[in-house]
Image: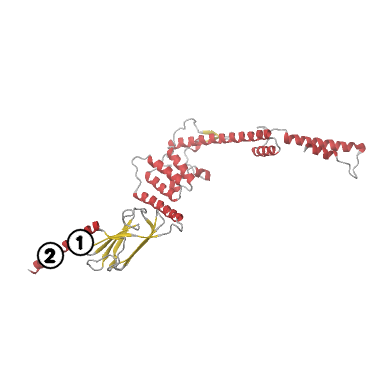
Amino acid sequence: WHWSTWSAVGNLTPRAGVAFAGGSTYERMVSALLCHLYLAHADDTNVPCGPSDGRSVTEQRQRGVALYAAGRPAAADLCLTSALARVTAQLESLAAEAEAIRAYRMARQASPDGPVSGGAEGCLVGADGSQVCLGALAGRAEPAPSSSLAVADGVGVDDVAGCTSQAEALAFLQRIERGECHRGACDAAPAALEEGLLVAARRHWWEAARGVVGVLRGVPSFQISTHGRRALTEIRDGAGSVLSLLRQTSLDEATISCAVQWAQGESSVHLNVKFAARLDAPVTVLNVDNEEVSINASHVTFRGLGRQKPKVYTLNIELFGEVDAAASNWSFGSVGTVRFVLQKAERGEWKRLTKGADKVKNHRVWWEHQEKVQAEDRARRKAEREAAEAAERAEQLEQE
């Protein structure tokens, strides 16, 4: 560039209408132009950056980029090093000021009316060299944070449930761990922390939730409540059901007709439905989601999507006799089962479970429960007989 400039200037010729006395005016013009160009070129390429060169940090960064582009990495590195040193010094000054403010605040929280150790008036020197004395503010209530930075450090909240972001919740938990919750500044009670755990889990703030558990582990003899455990279980099961649906493919889609054990008494029928095609098959599905249950006078139906395996488990039985649907009920039993208690519309013994006479290969009598149901029937009949005899005696006495 330098030599091309000299060449371009050397090719200048007088223009028409411009007078050059003996060429002296033209020579002076060319000399001044060449000096200006040389000095400008020297300033751009030879003067290095420095702490006292008058440039701002942004200007030093831009100069460093330009020097790298010009093929002068050593000079560029000097500019970037100078800019980095200045920014680092500013950050260190701000960090020292922030630490001094934090220490002063903690001292005032611990002793609002007492002297501040390390300084009579709690004066601080700012990054710009100005002095700020906080002694006059000790007796005033600390104002609510007015900026996002004040809230981000967890100061503007008193529990996890009041946080608006996971970063804010983590900052709040760090305050608890540092012992900065003085004089009711934040709620570190186990009940409030457990509620914060549930809020963090519902908002999917898993890092904050783990942080709450870490704090609760430090509470002697703490046990999570039944409500809290149930709520966390529901969150886990909900996520698991969604994952099961995502894992399901066309190859996984299958319908399993559930195996059934049944027992009967004089007035009821009991079903134990297993989430498997055979009673002797191992349990691979512990529970199901999206269950659909129907009980009417002649039929019992069930349908559910396996949580551990994306299979559809069904039950459809046309019953041997009629039942009282309103008095019947169902519930999930032990792992991998659902149970039904059907109240017969009329007392009596059923020859079989289904209306059709064809044998169903995965239906079997529930012998161990059959004995229990029969024993209950005997006890009920005995109680009814004794009640009838007592009523009859009472009636005889009344007649006498």
Q: Quick one: 381 or 113, which is closer to the camera?
A: 381
The answer to which of marks 1 and 2 sits earlier in the sequence is: 1
Q: Which residue is mark 2?
A: 389
Q: Where is residue 213 drawn, in percent x and y?
A: 40, 43
- Residue 225 seen anywhere in this rendered image of the structure: yes
Q: Mark 1 against mark 2, which lies toward the viewer?
A: 1
Which quadrant holds residue 52? top right
Q: Nearer the viewer, residue 368 or 293?
A: 368
Q: Amino acid at mark 2?
A: Glu
Q: Is residue 382 above or below residue 93?
A: below
Residue at the far left: name it.
Answer: 400
Q: Is residue 147 visible?
A: no
Residue 119, given in percent of the width and then of the height, sits at 49, 31
The secondary element bearing badge 1 is classed as helix
At which x and y percent is residue 60?
66, 37
Q: CA distance from mark 1 to mark 2?
A: 18 Å
Residue 386 occupies which quadrant of the picture?
bottom left
**Label 1: how many residues lie within 10 Å, few (<14), some (14-19) or many (20+)?**
some
Q: Nearer the viewer, residue 294 or 252?
A: 252
Residue position marked by numbered label 1 in the rendering = 377
Callout 2 crowding tier (Cα within 10 Å): few <14, some 14–19, many ≥20 = few
- Mark 2 element type: helix
The residue sitting at 68% across, 33% down in the picture is 75
Kindly identify the amino acid type of the residue bearing the numbered disc 1.
Asp
At x 40%, y 54%, the residue is 309
Quarter of the C terminus within the rendering: bottom left
